[in-house]
Image (tube, rainbow, N blue to C red):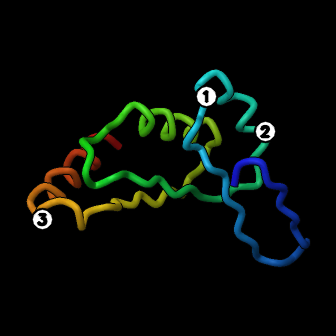
């Protein structure tokens, strides 16, 4: 979470979150040094928007800069759209990534 410090106990599994909702593209390189301990990323994509949105491209660029090998892409807000729209967006996501 932005603005919060995380404490890690060595040898213990932990979860750390970095909120990139206000990502500044000019700060992507320093980002790779700040979160070097990350193993994976969650990429949330709103089901009621087309894909990709500008911020989705920026977030994926940040994930690539951090050289993360594990990415879990989540479609949320699908309860706000018809099933056919959710499936269409799913295809957009596959084409995008």
Contact check, label 3 and label 1, Cβ < 8 Å: no
> Would residue 86 appear left or right of 26 to someone viewing this image?
left
Which dot marks residue 33?
Answer: 2
Left of 40 or right of it: where is 43? left
Is residue 4 found left or right of 45 in the rendered image?
Answer: right
Q: Are marks 1 and 2 in contact (CB under 8 Å)?
A: no
Q: Earlier in the sequence, mark 3 or mark 1?
A: 1
Mark 3 falls on what kind of element? Answer: helix
Vertical position of residue 14 compared to residue 95: above or below: below
* Local crowd size for mark 1, using a 10 Å CA cut-off: few (<14), some (14–19), many (≥20): few
Position above or below: 24 against 46 = above
Q: Nearer the viewer, residue 83 or 13?
A: 83
Left or right: 45 with respect to 92? right
C-alpha distance separating marks 2 and 3: 40 Å
Instruction: For the residues labelled 2 and 3, say whether their Cβ atoms are less than 8 Å apart.
Output: no
Q: Residue furthest left?
A: 84
Which residue is drawn at the image coordinates 77% and 48% (left, top)? 3
Tell me where residue 33 sits by quadrant: top right
Rounded to the nearest angstrom, the CA distance separating label 1 from label 2 is 15 Å
Question: Disc 1 on helix, strand or loop?
Answer: loop
Label 2's element?
Answer: helix
Q: Residue 49 at x, y = what percent? A: 27, 45
In what quadrant of the picture does the N terminus appear?
bottom right
Mark 2 closeness class: few <14, some 14–19, many ≥20 residues within 10 Å: few
Q: Residues within 10 Å of mark 3 (few under 14, many from 20)?
A: few
Which picture quadrant has residue 40?
bottom right
Q: Residue at x 31, y 61 (%)?
A: 77
The residue indicated by pointer 1 is 24
Q: What numbered label is drawn on residue 83?
A: 3
**For the residues marked 3 and 1, what is the alpha-carbon distance in whole angstroms?**
33 Å
| Residue drawn at the location 79% of the way across and 54% of the way down | 4
Q: Residue at x 83, y 61 (%)?
A: 6
């Amino acid at each position: 979470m932005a603005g919060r410090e995380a404490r890690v106990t060595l040898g213990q599994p932990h979860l750390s979150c970095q909120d990139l909702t206000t990502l500044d593209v000019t700060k992507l390189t320093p980002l790779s040094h700040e979160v070097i301990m990350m193993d994976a990323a969650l990429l949330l994509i709103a089901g009621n928007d087309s894909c990709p949105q500008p911020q989705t491209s920026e977030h994926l660029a940040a994930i690539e800069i951090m050289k993360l090998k594990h990415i879990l892409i989540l479609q949320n807000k699908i309860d706000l759209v018809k099933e056919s729209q959710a499936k269409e967006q799913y295809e957009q996501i596959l084409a995008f990534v």
